Amino acid sequence: MAPKHHPTPLSGGDRKALAKELGRARAMTTILAAQSEEARSKGEALIRQADKLLCEAVNERWWADGGPADPSPTIDQAINGGYPWLQIECSRCRTRRDVDLAALRHPPTTFVHDLAGRLRCSKCAKAGKRPPATLLQLAQRDRHPDPET
């Protein structure tokens, strides 16, 4: 956006008054920008806290009800809330594994409970079977970190 042009007044008193008002306006933009940044950071912290509480509530509901429940957080909300891992279990061979939600090729607005029918056991896939996964819980870290890292 092009800067606004203020024609310079002819008299000295008007020029001084215009310079004073322009100085106030520039100072006010700095103050308002700082307040905006502060409010934005507070808002982001509140959203992160809300996402974390949603993930904890879903984990408790899954534990109490024995399976995934609708509604659940989206992939983005789970990652933002500090729960980037999903613990699943194969419904056929009972093999447990952790899935990194950030590495999934699903849209970030996909609900976590919708992943139950999409995730498959790689061990059973080698045997020609494709049973769906059972969602256990959202986790803050991988249960079995790689030994290389």
Image (cartoon, grey):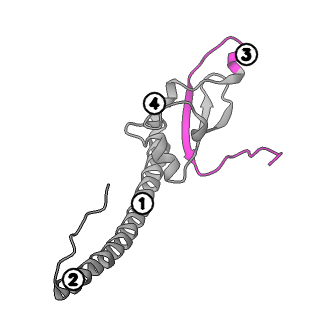
Q: Which numbered tag is attached to residue 114?
A: 4
Query: Label 2 vs label 3: CA separation?
Result: 82 Å
Q: CB of mark 2 within 8 Å of CB of mark 3? A: no
Magenta stretch holds residue 114: no
Helix, strand or loop status at disc 4: helix
Magenta stretch holds residue 135: yes
Residue beneath disc 2: 15
Front disc: 2 or 3: 2
Question: Which numbered disc flags the more N-terminal residue, 1 or 2?
Answer: 2
Helix, strand or loop status at disc 2: helix
Dominant secondary-structure state across the stretch colored magenta? loop
Query: Label 4 vs label 1: CA separation?
Result: 26 Å
Residue beneath disc 3: 126
Q: Which numbered tag is attached to residue 44?
A: 1
Amino acid type, label 4: Asp
Q: Residue at x 34, y 76 (%)?
A: 31
